[in-house]
Amino acid sequence: MQELSSFVALGDSFTEGMDDPGPDGHFMGWADRFAALISTHHSGLRYANLAIRGKTLHEIVEEQLPLATALKPNLVAFCAGGNDILTPGTDPDALAEVYEIAVADLRAAGSEVIVFTGFDTKTTPLLRSLRGKIAIYNTHLWSVADRYHCHVVDLWAMSVLHDPRAWSEDRLHLSPEGHRRVALRTAEVLGYKTEEAWDTPWPPSEESRWMTQRRRDLKWAREHVVPFVGRLVRGESAGDGLAPKRPELLPVCAD
């Protein structure tokens, strides 16, 4: 990777960092962790994070993209469309067209771009039914990345994230350890050597009894999935009224 002076992250809750609490009351997440990792290679690196939970692809493009291009960063992380994919009735082909226009704008502004595929939901009850939709969207993202010479972090292929310990209680957002592993993987994709491997096997865990796990699945669906999808269908967002946690390019060492 060429010498970097600035990095901007765009997106939704994944890039904002839910559920990875930081010491200042904000979430950390993979992007904060990645910025800290690469700052050891780039003295004076400045970092901004414009991501806000609950944002759809169109909202990210309309609200965050102009801010990012105005900052003229060397590197942009662009992950968007996850909330759209979870919304019933959305078309991954149409979403990909919007995504491609955004990537073209970022590249035209002179930024290197990191693209993130969607997660493989095969181990998540209820959400596994979306695998086909996610796979179609991912195929488009790979094509967009190829056309515009973007870096790709293939979250779908990160089988280490199939472990429940990679996810928070709601199973919709990564745990701190899940975010840490995505940060390490992102660094690897961009050519940085790290002291730890993102795919280090998890230590053995105690298996839950089948009935206990089913009760947990039902409780999770009732308390997290149903309310979440309901908000998406109604057009409500957990990020309404929230501002980006790091709207300006600031030195990473200021954290």
Image: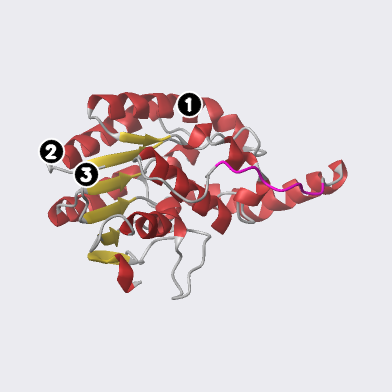
- The residue that label 2 is drawn on is 108
Left/right of residue 199 with respect to residue 116 in the rendered view: right
Can residue 253 be found in the magenta stretch?
A: no
Which residue ends up furthest to the bottom in the rendered image? 24
Part of the protein shown in magenta? 199-206
Q: Position of residue 208 (x, y in %)?
A: 83, 47
At x 66%, y 36%, the residue is 123
Q: Position of residue 143 (x, y in %)?
A: 32, 23
- The residue that label 1 is drawn on is 135
Residue type at mark 3 is Gln
Q: Is residue 175 visible?
A: no
Q: For mark 2, give the secondary structure.
A: helix
At x 41%, y 29%, the residue is 137
At x 36%, y 71%, the residue is 255
Q: Are marks 1 and 2 in contact (CB under 8 Å)?
A: no
**Main secondary-structure element of the magenta-colored stretch:** loop
Q: Nearer the viewer, residue 193 or 231?
A: 193
Can residue 203 be found in the magenta stretch?
A: yes
Q: Which mark, residue 2?
A: 3
Q: Is residue 92 above or below residue 254?
A: above
